[in-house]
Structures are given as structure tokens and as C-alpha cells.
Image (cartoon, rainbow, N blue to C red):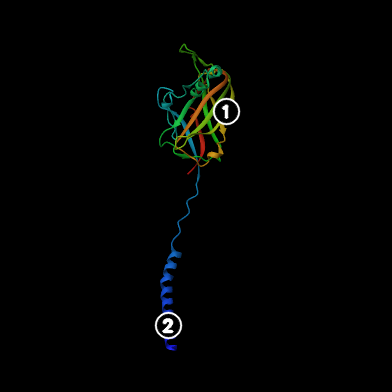
Amino acid sequence: MEIQMKRAFAVSLMVAVVATSLLGPAEAAKKKKPKKPPAPAPVQVDATYFLRRDGETCEDASLFLSLVDAEDVDPGSCGNWTMGILAPALTAAEQQATPLHYATREADGVPVTLDATKDITGLIGVKSTTSIPFANVATPVRWGLGQTTLNVELLGTLADGTEKTIGSTTVDYDVTPGDAAQLYEVEFSMKPDAALDKMAFTKLTLRLLNSGNSIGHGYYTTDNPASHFKMGTWK
């Protein structure tokens, strides 16, 4: 009986040793399995978008935003000098259609992920007209005058087509007649909507309009100076 008990104990001991030897490497393998490296932290990068024009018209198709600045077609001749006096008489739909729209094109600065922790800053060159209204006659001076307001609005389009207002601002300044070289370099700053931080946009659109108690003013330059804005992004 004692011998049988010893044999049973020896068998049990051997089973335990074998089981341990089999489990040991498996447990060790589990412990040695390399961990996935943590995802890299997003990096804040500023992006500068330039207002550009590559067509003879001032339609939206000719106006665009680009990360690259270059010489443009007939820069500084697109705008609306009548808004100061006509805006009160326009319908809401007409006022919505009147601003100029500069939008990004595919793969040029989009898609982009907004960093809403940084202000959006920029400069828009604005000129007055050098012609007599409806007569197509040139004048020796830029004769715009009055109190004007530059309205700036940046819109972003999500992948599903939803359009969001990233930010908007207005800048007031006075306009007086001057020589043909006269222009106003209007600087602006606006805070983006904090709720849009880290949202990815497939398209950006900048809307510009001069309104207020003014006339003969509201043409935006793409060269000399190169109108532009800078915004924070996440990479």
C-alpha cells in the first residue's frame, strides 16, 4: 500500500512538473509580447492660405485659396463698390450672394484639421475704384470715400457636406480719395469656434464684403499685397 501511494505521489509530481514546464513558456511568451507604441501626439502647425485668382472673371470658379502664393490674373479688380449704398435695399438672399468667395481646391491645403486654440489672423488689401460708375471711364484717382466695414467670415465643409462657420469678424475704417496707388491693408483677427477644435474639413471658404456708409470702395487684392490668413492646424 505504501509503495502504491509513493508511486501515485511520484506520478502526480511528474504531471505537475510537466504542466508547469508547458505553462511556463506560454506565460513567459505572453509577458514578452511587445506592446504597441502609443499613437504620436498631434502637433500644432500654422497654415497660411493666400487669396488667388486664375481667371478673367470674378466668379467663384476663378477665385480660390492656396497654400502657394504666385502672380495672379488681374489682381485687385474683384469686389463690389456699391454695397455701402445698396446693401439696405437688398434682400437677404441678395446680400448673401453678393460677397466674394475664395475657396480651397482639392489637395491644396485640404483636408485640414482645425486647431481652435489659436486665433485666425490675416491681412486683406482693399482698393477703391478708378472709374466713373456705369460709364466705363477711368478717373485719375481712386475716389472711394466714407466709413466702411470689412466683413470677414471663414467657413469649413465637413466630409458629409455640412458647412460650419469657423469664425467671423468685422473691421471698421475710413476711406478717402487718393492716387491710383492707394490701397488699405486691413488686418483682422478672429477666434475660431472652440467646438470645432480637431474637426477635419475638406474645404475652406473665405467670404469678403465691404459694407457700411461708403461708396466706390471694396476691391480685394491678390498681389501687392498678397491678401492672406493664417490659422492653426493639427498634424
Residue at the front extreme, as displayed? 1
SS at circle 2: helix
Q: Earlier in the sequence, mark 1 or mark 2?
A: 2
Q: Position of residue 123 (x, y in %)?
A: 53, 30
Q: Position of residue 186 (x, y in %)?
A: 55, 27
Q: Choose between 4 and 85: the one closer to the eye.
A: 4
**Residue 212 visible to the viewer:** yes
* 230 displayed left or right of 14: right
The kind of residue on which mark 2 rests is Ala
For the residues labelled 1 and 2, the Cα–Cα distance comes to: 92 Å
Q: Is residue 209 above or below residue 140?
A: below
Labelled disc at residue 212: none
Labelled disc at residue 8: 2
SS at circle 1: strand
The kind of residue on which mark 1 rests is Thr
Q: Which residue is mark 1?
A: 170
Q: Is residue 9 above or below residue 223?
A: below
Q: Position of residue 167 (x, y in %)?
A: 54, 33
